[in-house]
Every structure is written in C-alpha cells, then in structure tokens.
Image: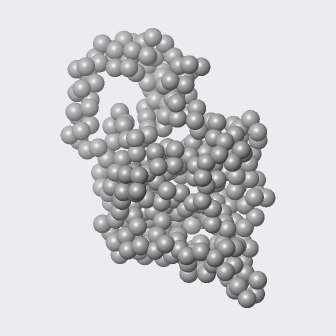
C-alpha cells in the first residue's frame, strides 16, 4: 500500500532485493579461494574511517560458507514467494542488504571455503594460503559462519575464532568485534563486544548495568534475530551491533524509545518525562482502549529498532488512537 511504501521505504527495497540479485543488479564481493589474492591486513581495521566518497566506515562483516554452499539449501526463504535459496544465494543477498541498511557504512564480503582448506596448491588445492584467509577473518569486525559442517573446516573455524578471541583480550578498549557460528556442525561460543559466551564474567550474569552484561544481552538479541531465518532480521542484528560498538551510528537502528541499561538512568528518565509531558493525552487514551493497550503491551516485548517486527504488530492493531500515539 501507499502507506506502507512511504513509512517503510527500506522494507520495500529489501523485499525486492531477491529479484535484483537474480538479475545480477548491484556489486557483490565474493572470495572463492580458488583465485590468488592478497588479504588486506591493517594495524587497526576496526576503527571507523572515511572512504573516498566521504562515507564513514564502521567496520566489515565476513560471511563464511562451505565450498558447496551453492548446493546446500538454507533455512532462509520461508516467507519468500520463490522458495528457499541456497546458502550461497542467501549470503549474497545478506551482504547486499548490509550495504543498504547501513547506507554503505559497513562493508561485507562472502568467503567460500575451499573443499579442503589444508590441501596445498601443488596437490590441487587453493592458491590462496590458509594464512591469508586467517588474516582476512581476523581483521573483520564481524565474522558469521553459516552451515560449516566438515571436520577440517570446523577445526579451521575454531582456530580462527580462538585467534580473534585472543586479539580481543589483548585490546580490551576495542569492542567492535563479534563472531557467531550459525547452523554449523559444532557449537562454537559466540562473542559480541566484551562478552565471551565461553567464559562469562561475574558481572555479565549478576550486574545488568555493566559492559559485560550489555554484551551478553547483545549476544542473546543477535542470536534471537538470526534464528528467525529472514535476511532482514539477520541484517538488523548486525546493524544493532555496529550501532552500539562502532565509532558511529547506523540510521536504521539508532533511535529507540525503549528504556535500557545502555542508555543509563538519566537518559531513560528524560525520555519518560518527555513522553508524559508531551504525549500525556495520547498515552492516556491509548492505555484506556483495550485494543490499543494490547498493542502497547506487545510492543514492549519488541526492540523498537526492529522496524519489521514493530510494523507487523502495528498494522495488526491499527487505529486512530494508536496512530496518534505513534506520531506523538
């Protein structure tokens, strides 16, 4: 509808992205590891920088998929009119959406592992060295492994994850760093910001206002979004991460009316005061209406930065009272 397209233009753009992908629209960076290339290694690749077009770069996401990713059916696509794509198709679509959702602030790349990463070039293996690949993954802000199942690939991934974790421990001031293994043949501990799922601190579990606890909430939220198996939710998870832990903001997710530990007591109190003083009548009328209040109660369970989930709820309860409340 016109209302949908004007209020949520990026949702429409992302919905049409699969057709764009099928027709080959837009640039996609894929490393197949059957071609010789040099990994770019920098001293501090996670600090925000400005590119030639004046766009502030907040980091890079690398999606790691198996050698046969074009033959493995993914769990994505349950809402798609054309069915479930392969893992490689889904990964290509995700990296396009990362660029769209971040307005070009987050770079993204798909890395397709060789059939046997330990096989040497003279034996018919890839001529991109294992070390080059390790450097590429170590330097990325976010590494997401999808459908990695072979034992030697899992061993390689475990080594990379441990190496990245060591680097994080050595540079505790830099938290723009996350890694997840999704639908893989082995469970690898997730990391986001200062929180390491394999070794949670005392404060992460018992002191909710601390940085470690914030990182734990980030891991839980990102895993929850990943497990919905939609490309939009997948990308929103990454945008929320970069918005919190990079040196800049992602417009798509920077605004929230939720009370959170991350905002702190002062900002939460200020926002609550503004809502009551400026929107008191709208709040009172909405809370007094059974249908409108039911929507508000359900919205409290959703991160308002998750525009897709918020929109689905709002259109299910759309009314003049809810519209007035939302606009206020």
Q: Percent position (x, y) of residue 102?
A: 46, 46
Quarter of the rendering occupied by the C terminus: top left
Q: Residue at x 56, y 81 (%)?
A: 131
Q: Is residue 203 left or right of residue 291?
A: left
Q: Percent position (x, y) of residue 169?
A: 37, 73
Residue 77, above or below 191: above
Residue 300, above or below 167: above
> Which is nearer the eye, 255 or 203?
255
Q: Is residue 88 left or right of residue 180?
A: right
Residue reaching furthest to the bottom:
122
Q: Would you identify the image quadrant in which residue 15 lies?
A: top right
Quarter of the rendering occupied by the N terminus: top right
Q: Percent position (x, y) of residue 107?
A: 49, 56
Residue reaching furthest to the front:
52
Whether residue 31 is visible, yes or no, is yes
Q: Residue at x 51, y 16 (%)?
A: 318
Q: Percent position (x, y) of residue 96?
A: 58, 49
Image colouring: one colour
Q: Residue at x 53, y 57 (%)?
A: 108
Q: Residue at x 56, y 19 (%)?
A: 2
Q: How many numbered discs sit on the rendered protein?
A: 0
Whether residue 144 is visible, yes or no, is no
Residue 300, above or below 209: above
> Which is nearer the eye, 56 or 285?
56
Residue 294, above or below 301: above
């Amino acid at each position: 509808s016109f209302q949908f397209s004007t209020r949520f233009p990026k949702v429409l753009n992302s919905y049409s992205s699969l057709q764009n992908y099928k027709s080959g629209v837009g640039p996609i960076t894929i490393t197949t590891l059957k071609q010789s290339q040099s990994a770019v290694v920098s001293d501090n690749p996670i600090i925000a920088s400005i590119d030639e077009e004046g766009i502030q770069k907040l980091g890079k996401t690398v999606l790691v998929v198996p050698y046969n990713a074009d033959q493995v059916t993914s769990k994505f696509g349950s809402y798609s009119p054309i069915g479930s794509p392969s893992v490689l198709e889904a990964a290509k679509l995700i990296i396009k959406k990362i660029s769209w959702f971040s307005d070009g602030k987050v770079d993204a790349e798909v890395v397709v592992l060789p059939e046997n990463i330990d096989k040497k070039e003279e034996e018919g293996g890839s001529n991109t060295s294992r070390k080059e690949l390790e450097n590429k993954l170590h330097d990325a802000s976010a590494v997401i492994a999808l459908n990695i199942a072979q034992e030697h690939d899992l061993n390689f991934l475990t080594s990379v994850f441990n190496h990245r974790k060591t680097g994080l421990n050595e540079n505790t001031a830099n938290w723009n760093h996350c890694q997840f293994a999704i639908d893989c043949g082995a469970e690898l501990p997730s990391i986001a910001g200062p929180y390491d799922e394999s070794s949670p601190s005392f404060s992460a579990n018992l002191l909710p206002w601390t940085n470690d606890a914030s990182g734990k909430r980030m891991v839980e939220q990102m895993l929850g979004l990943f497990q919905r198996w939609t490309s939009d939710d997948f990308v929103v998870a990454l945008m929320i991460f970069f918005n919190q832990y990079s040196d800049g903001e992602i417009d798509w997710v920077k605004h929230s009316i939720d009370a959170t530990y991350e905002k702190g007591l002062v900002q939460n109190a200020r926002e609550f005061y503004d809502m009551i003083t400026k929107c008191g009548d709208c709040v009172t009328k909405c809370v007094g209406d059974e249908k409108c209040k039911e929507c508000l109660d359900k919205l409290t369970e959703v991160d308002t930065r998750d525009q897709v989930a918020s929109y689905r709820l709002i259109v299910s309860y759309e009314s003049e009272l809810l519209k007035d409340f939302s606009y206020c």
